[in-house]
Image: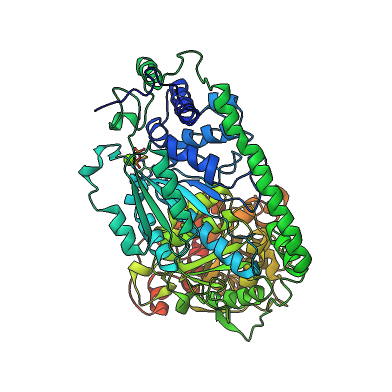
Amino acid sequence: MTLAPETKGIPISLDQLCINSIRVLAIDAVQKANSGHPGMPMGMAPAAYLLFTRFLRHSPKNPHWHGRDRFVLSAGHGSMLLYSLLYLTGYDLPLDEIKRFRQLGSKTPGHPECHLTPGVETTTGPLGQGFGNGVGMAIAAKHMAAHFQRDGDSLFDHRIFAIVSDGDLMEGVASEAASIAGHLGLGNIVYLYDDNHITIDGRTALAFSEDVCRRFEAYGWHTQAVEDANDLEALARAIENGIAERNRPSLIRVHSHIGYGSPHRQDTSEAHGKALGTDEVKLTKQFYGWPLEPDFYVPAEALAQFRRCVERGAELERQWNAAFETYAKANPKEAAEFRAMMAGELPAGWDQDLPVFTPKDSLATRESASRAEQAIAKRVWNLFGGSADLNESTFTDVKDGGDFERTDYAGRNLHFGIREHAMCSILNGIALHGGFIPYGSSFFVFTDYCRPAIRLAALMGLHIVYVFTHDSIGVGEDGPTHQPIEHLAAMRAIPNLTVIRPADANEACAAWRVAMKHPQGPVMLVLSRQKLPTLDRTVFAPANGLARGAYVLGETAGKTPDIILIASGAELHLALEARPELEKRGCAVRVVSMPSFELFERQDATYRDSVLPPAVRRRLAIEAGSPLSWYRWVGLDGDVIGMDTFGASAPYQDLMNHFGFTTQKVVERALRLLSR
Ligand SMILES: Cc1ncc(C[n+]2csc(CCOP(=O)(O)OP(=O)(O)O)c2C)c(N)n1
Ligand SMILES: [Mg+2]
């Protein structure tokens, strides 16, 4: 390892002071916390410095300014790189927060979390996700520009920059996202790849030997290489070229040194994920020509140089606002629409075409939900999404909406291809970009392929609608590989994800209504493949009870119930059929429709007790999925009819009989419970 001391006798340039300020803040913060990842910030500080001070159009005092370029730190473990930049360039992230890196209640958590820290565009850490999020942001920017941009104005041409690491590029989700980004020709993307040859286990050569640039060229990307991460000229030229390339996304491979400047840690995996230690901190600061005291030292001239971003950003913002005013004068309708969608407002009358179904209609909920979605999409153009090659089955494509393609970014229907994981990561990016209510669809069983991104959507509190169909063994002939079993339980286990499994067509409409008005987190609609009866709402309680998560659908008049039958989705109809059978035997029965645990949990105790009175302890839940999540609601004196195996391949009616989802079985189990 050769380290070329930069300081001997030569005055350190201002650029160098700034770059080393980033490095030293990262080193000191990790050292103080005795936890974190100093190596990557030390290696990539020059590129990050250039980006934030020269290329990224951002306004530190207004992190939500729409016209800003987006910066994604996909390698979220390098969080101190981002926190240093945010502090230095003047975001509302004071030095004290840097000193509280990784501590309880700080704005500097171990990995960047966008809902906590001003200037953090997305929550990253699970490698590959940031890569996909950036592609989503780029898609959103292109769609918005295609919709709003009029000749000549450049209001909607912001760019998406990211730093991605070896780990990011090894993860499958990044390959999926890179493939679709290249296919779509997203020229508003410029990603810097931190090619430092090191991951946690050691040299990348242990597990990663493809030619990354050639791989990305094959995806349709524009690629460049910078052989020395400290060569600012070369970096600047490459970034300029990347920006100038308008028809392809750009990847700049930057050969860097993890832990740059640390005599014993540079270019080793030891620099990746732990504090350097006091001795090594000292040696490293000496290498940078840095004073050893105090910690967190930033030279005044370096800070001043960074803080020029504040005025620069304010000026960019002023120009943008002035251009927007001109635009608004010429295009008042569009400007009003833009402001409303950015504020998250739904247009007046957005729900007035929602269908009302009658008992004559026998529809799968995927079908009724599709009709609801079409009715909404007609009035809400910024409902924007698509499916992972399953429109034939999920029915989510917007009729006459056109396809989002490289030749037509105004097209409303996204075709993710068979890339469920990237689909969900991209949806996160679209939501983070702002202005859209993104949705995506596939088979419910393939939430397994989406889960990491869904979890992050829930963590970030993003307004996204998932449409997952083929919700149970009701799938039928496709068999166990396609039959969700534990999936409802798994999705219900994700905090802040609202899962809704409607039981009939009108509940499906009510579910879409909830989904549109739930900005605080993602909503997942879980829909049937098979046809279901539409309940007669002149006999049963209205379907808008769904909004409260669970509601009493019907019960034996004038009596305290002996038993409560609770069900979601298709199985609700079994409970309804069992009720008269049980009444014939003298039992008082209440039937509760429970399409959403999460919505029900959000109700007050009075309402919850009115639906599930604590005194009524005999409760039977029926759902064609793992019983795991139901025990909370049925209690120790209750029972669950569910699925404990992977299902089987057969016509779905045969499966329902075989696995005990029949009226007769429900009656039997209810009687058994009553006789206990
Ligand atoms: C999906 C996922 N798997 C594993 C990890 C744990 N992890 C954090 S960083 C890392 C790899 C580090 O290598 P690289 O991406 O090259 O970063 P560098 O060490 O160069 O900073 C791993 C495996 C993770 N954060 N996300
Ligand atoms: Mg690496």
Q: Is residue 263 above or below residue 368?
A: above
In the foreground, 604 or 526: 526
In the foreground, 492 or 648: 492
x then y, percent, for residue 233 = 42, 41
Location of ligand 2 given as a quarter of the image: top left
Structure colour scheme: rainbow
Q: Residue at the location (56% across, 48% down)?
A: 460
Instruction: Point out the residue furthest to the left here.
Output: 206
Q: Is residue 134 above or below residue 273?
A: below
Q: Residue at the location (33% across, 74% down)?
A: 649
In which quadrant of the rendered image does the N terminus lie?
Answer: top left
Tally of numbered discs? 0
Quadrant assignment, res 231: top left
Instruction: Point out the residue furthest to the bottom here.
Output: 360
Quadrant assignment, res 255: top left
Instruction: Point out the residue furthest to the front here.
Output: 10
- Whether residue 565 is visible, yes or no, is yes
In the foreground, 397 or 478: 397
Left or right of residue 264: residue 393: right
- Whether residue 106 is visible, yes or no, is no
x then y, percent, for residue 239 = 45, 49
In the foreground, 45 or 489: 45
x then y, percent, for residue 8 = 37, 18
Left or right of residue 277: residue 122: right
x then y, percent, for residue 264 = 28, 22
Q: Is residue 529 above or below residue 202?
A: below
Q: Is residue 23 above or below residue 674?
A: above
